[in-house]
Amino acid sequence: MSIFNFFRAAPRASAVQAKERLQIVMAHERAGRSGPDYLPMLQQELLAVIAKYVNIDENKVEVKLDRGGDCSTLEVNIELPAREQAKAASAAKPAADKPGNDHAAAKRSVGGSVGNAGAKKRI
Amino acid sequence: MSKIIVMTSGKGGVGKTTSSAAFATGLALRGFKTVVIDFDVGLRNLDLVMGCERRVVFDFINVINGEAKLNQALIKDKRIENLYILPTSQTRDKDALTREGVEKVLNELSKEFDYILCDSPAGIERGALMSLYFADHAIIVTNPEVSSVRDSDRILGVLNSRSRRAEQGLEPVTQQLLLTRYDPERVEKGEMLKVDDVLEILAIPLLGVIPESQAVLRASNVGMPVILDEASNAGLAYSDAVGRFLGEDIDHRFVTPQKKGLFSRLLRRSA
Ligand SMILES: Nc1ncnc2c1ncn2[C@@H]1O[C@H](COP(=O)(O)OP(=O)(O)O)[C@@H](O)[C@H]1O
Ligand SMILES: [Mg+2]
């Protein structure tokens, strides 16, 4: 045995890793299990709407329903991309709420459908 | 009124059948009239573990289908008073388990027995669902290993949502953990999840810890439930677990490495 092996820190016990991994994966699975059936659909549709305007990563969206005694909350957590990416994304899209002349609007909507292809796929 | 227990786990090969045989035997030894039913349709094995494989004529599915009477299919254990086995079919599949059919057989058994123990197959499909549907008590058999713990959690979810008690809004099925194949030496080396880790994750009461033991294989070789091997740690641990199930206050044994005598230490060193 070399002197280096002797001084090397003991590797983290594998059982500790097992416990941590289980805690993480199971917290996630339990949350999904207790929610109502429509949550996954709701998540998909919310995602589709938001993706029309902002470039988002579908893995960074979380929809959670908490049932309380007298009040329930629907929590939607969406992580948006960094500034630069967001700008680039919105530049590629039509400003849907801005009224323009008919000709320009038609042009934009063509560009829009191309820009939205990624979002459409997720629906 | 008889009590219905399901021995369940989600994952296969964790010790449900071993534990069912031991538990049913333990309950009968304490004077309760007990029947153990094999729900693993198509993969009959409880008969072998109980040592009655050559006495199977009719089975659970024959009774469900009205092809045999219940007392034609029930096998009375030769060693222990009060113990009966209801073997399953080896040729049919799990679709033969209809809810009405299972209910009819359980109703008939509950007139005669104190305990009805259902040995669940692996998975969360029909066979497993039928075995847990009517349960009053669930014993969750888990190995100290990531996939077994996760699958046990899945099964707990199923018990809380798809059992008869859950569907009818009755008192929930009681749930207790039986941690099997536990190796205190590997736990001490940090190679295996500790009892406390598994309890923390699954958050259900602990019924027992069954150590990894060579006695289990020896017992199944000869068709004897391991609880009858009173010289083995696994047998004693099962006995304790049955006592706890019945409400006795018994300390957990075999959860820390056994101190080696000087003699065995010397032997190991020379080996
Ligand atoms: N405590 C134990 N020590 C050693 N081997 C065990 C123990 N419990 C179960 N086994 C072995 O594990 C295997 C699977 O057990 P079994 O009871 O058939 O599991 P299941 O019914 O959950 O599929 C068998 O070979 C059995 O002998
Ligand atoms: Mg089995």
Image (cartoon, coloured by chain):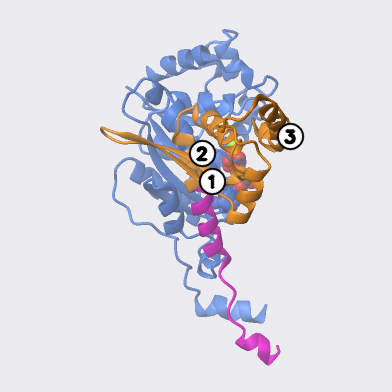
Chain colours: A orange, B blue
Q: Which residue in the structure is indicated by mark 2? A: B154
Q: Residue at x 51, y 69 (%)?
A: B188
Mark 3 or 2: the one toward you: 3
Q: Residue at x 48, y 56 (%)?
A: B233
Residue A27 placed where, x, y %? 47, 47
Element under disc 2: helix
Note whether ligand 1 is within 8 Å of mark 3.
no
Determine if residue B236 is in view. Answer: no
Are the residues flagged by discs 3 and 1 from a single subunit? Answer: no
Quarter of image, res A45: top right
Q: Residue at x 63, y 87 (%)?
A: A6
The magenta segment: A1-26
User: Between marks 3 and 2, how big is the CA–CA gap?
Assistant: 43 Å
Front one among B61 and B68: B61
Badge 1: chain ID: B
Element under disc 3: helix
Q: Which residue in the structure is indicated by mark 1? A: B150
Instruction: Classify mark 3: residues with Cα within 10 Å, few (<14), some (14-19) or many (20+).
Output: some
Three-letter code, disc 2: Arg
Based on the picture, tell me whether residue A109 belongs to the magenta stretch: no
Badge 3: chain ID: A
Three-letter code, disc 3: Val
Q: Are marks 1 and 2 in contact (CB under 8 Å)?
A: yes
By secondary structure, the bulk of the magenta-drawn segment is best described as helix
From the viewer's perspective, tell me whether residue B71 is left or right of residue A103. left
Q: Which residue in the structure is indicated by mark 3? A: A114
Instruction: Classify mark 2: residues with Cα within 10 Å, few (<14), some (14-19) or many (20+).
Output: many
